[in-house]
Structures are given as C-alpha cells and as structure tokens.
Amino acid sequence: MIYLDHAATGGSKAPAVMSAVLAALRCCANPGRSGHTLSLAAAERVFAARRLLNALFDGFGYERVIFTKNCTEALNLAILGGLKRGDHVVTTCLEHNSVLRPLEFLRESGVISYDVAPLTEGKLLPESVLSLVKQNTRMAVVTSASNVTGEVPDLKKIRALLPGNVLFVADGAQGAGHIPLSMKELGLDALAIAGHKGMGSIQGSGALLFSERMQLSPLLYGGTGSESRSLQMPSFYPDRLESGTLAYPAICSLLEGALIVQNKREEWAKKLVKTTSCVLKGIAGLKGYKAYFEPNPVGICAFSHENIASEELAGELSEKFRICVRGGLHCAPLAHKALGSFPDGLVRASFSPEQGKKEAKALLNALSEIAKYA
C-alpha cells in the first residue's frame, strides 16, 4: 500500500516520536495536577514542549502556547474566543471549514459579519484581502497553505497591507512543519497548528500560539490545577484556556516532532517541491487529466479526470492499485467553487518528505492505466 494522504494525517511517525508516546504512557501521571515526582516530571516535559514551539514559531512567550487536540480546536479558540459582537472578519475562499464554520456560526448568531476574498486567475492576491477591510474589521483569518491546491499565500504582504489594528490569524494546519512560520516576521497575532500532519506527531495533538494583542476567552470551563479555591477560571495563560487533563502522550509526540522539524524543515520543503514538480509534469502528459496545483513545499497534488468523478477515481486507486488518496471537497467547499471543481471536488495526492520519485511514478503509472479505459 502506498499512502498518499499525508495532508489528512501523517501516515508514518519517526521512531523518536513513537518512543516518546510509549514513554509517556509508561509514566502514567497527570502533569500540573500533583506534587509528586512523576507528575512534576510530566509537567516539565509539557513545559519543554511549550518552550520549543514558542521558539520554533517565534512566538510571544511559552505561556501563550495553548495545547489543543487538533488545529480545529485551536482555530475555534482564536475565532470564538477572540471576537465580540459587532466585529467584522475578512477571510479567504481557500479556507478549511475549521475557519468557515466558526465564522458562519457567529454570523448566523448575529455576533459578527464576514467577507471572503476570492481568487484572481486562480491565485489569492493580498490586495483582495485588503479590499474587504471595513471600519469595524477586527480580524483577518488566512490559511498558511491551501489543503486543496498547496498554494502558499503571501502572509507577510497581507499583514503589511492590513491596518495595524486588525488581528491577523493564520491556519497552520498544512503549513506548519513545511514552511517557515515566524509569527513576528509575518506579523501574526495567532497561529493554529496541527501536530499530526507536517509536524510529524500523533493525532490528538495541536496548539494555538497567540500574541499579547489577543485576549482570549475560554471555550471550556473546568479544573486547571491552579486557583482551585475559585469558581472562576484563572485569569492567566495557559491555564485560562486549558481546562481538564492534557493529552500528555500527544504533547510528548509533538515535542519530538518539533525537534525533528527544527532540523529538517528546509530540506524537506525542497524535496516536496521536487516531488510535486514530478507529478505535475507527469499529469500534463496524461490524456483526460487536469492539474489544479503548482510545485509546492507542502506536498499537495490535486487533479481531476474529465470522465471520472473524484471519489470514484480515488476508489479505483485504492482498490486496484493500493494507492491511498482523497477525493471530494476536502472540507474546503469555497476553494472548490473558486476553482470550478464544485460539487464533485478533486482527487488529492499528498506526499511526505520521505517519499519521492518512486511513489510519484507509481501514482502516474496507475493514472495512466485508468485513463486507458476511462
């Protein structure tokens, strides 16, 4: 089986990541909840993960690194916890439903309004984001990399064009671990990341990093191990946003994954550009197929066939050629509407840095065989 669905979740984990998870399970202690040796050791490991993520993404202090179970939860914290009645938000048509659905919920509830920047000749232009800013615009939310096309928006330029008072939030689900995401250099007020994709850790890991300009309200209320005499949530971070027991094994895996990314990201990005270039060139030579991507550092290759529905094509690749890809809308309906691939969607093959020409050739050979009887 050839796994080409890494944009959904990483298909393999480094030995150091797996070892970290096993060690965490053997520890079997609750960080930040007790004063005994095992609990303190676990708390120190969690603290190390906060510090590393803060350093890796050039954040605003380890206390402003909030652990979540995934990127969706992190984005909900930033959006639902950071907006108030009367605010306006600018976002883009490339966004995942983890951005669009919280915004739509707030709009339907009469809390906010929002506008969506379109594509221009298939690309997201920073000027398109700026053109939607209003007097009451409080936040702009933009993906770091499209989970459909692999496009990497120019976050730095978007920030430069936005008024200074507008909070800038990035969805790092696809970009984190693949591209440089320095919060201060890019002018980000919040960065949501998924641990189980480019960061190389396990499912159940994610984080939100945010600046001093964002004062976030909790989405969950409960025990934090601090200020337990009070029935109110603590006023300080990270405790204010981390109710309940942390996913300690997942956090340990994220720590190890981040250590690897710190040393390998640039090398991996170059390799993924080469791999996606190979696939793009191959698809161009196949009858009936259309590519919806350019060479990119996040490993995403989206395409269609003129006579075969995307989910049917994905099914054939799995059943007949043992190649795992994803068909459909990829939880990004507005992106497909902008690309003209709605409602059928596209087939998305997404590569890991450990893969290359061998896997790309296998995919292209399979597509060539399918085209013979399409």
Image: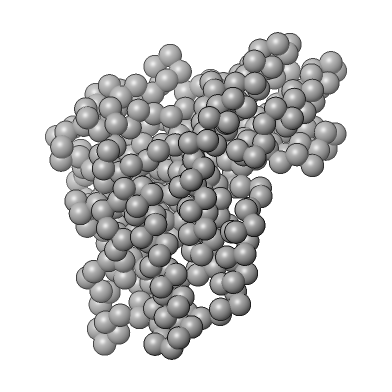
- Image position of 184 with respect to 82: above or below: above
Give percent across and percent down for residue 178.
49, 39
* In front of the other: 308 or 174: 174
* In front of the other: 203 or 230: 203
Which image quadrant for residue 229?
bottom left
Which image quadrant for residue 51?
bottom left
* In front of the other: 233 or 155: 155
Give percent across and percent down for residue 60.
26, 53
Give percent across and percent down for residue 64.
29, 59
Which quadrant is the C terminus positioned in? top right
Q: Which residue is painted at 43% across and 14% down in the image?
A: 121
Q: Which residue is painted at 45% across and 78% down in the image?
A: 41
- Image position of 313 with respect to 30: above or below: above
Answer with left or right where residue 166 lies relative to residue 281: left
Give percent across and percent down for residue 234.
25, 74
Answer with left or right where residue 266 lies relative to residue 104: right
Residue 323 shows in the view: yes
Q: Which residue is painted at 76% across and 36% down in the image?
A: 323
Residue 149 shows in the view: no
- Image position of 234 with respect to 192: above or below: below
* In front of the other: 64 or 314: 64
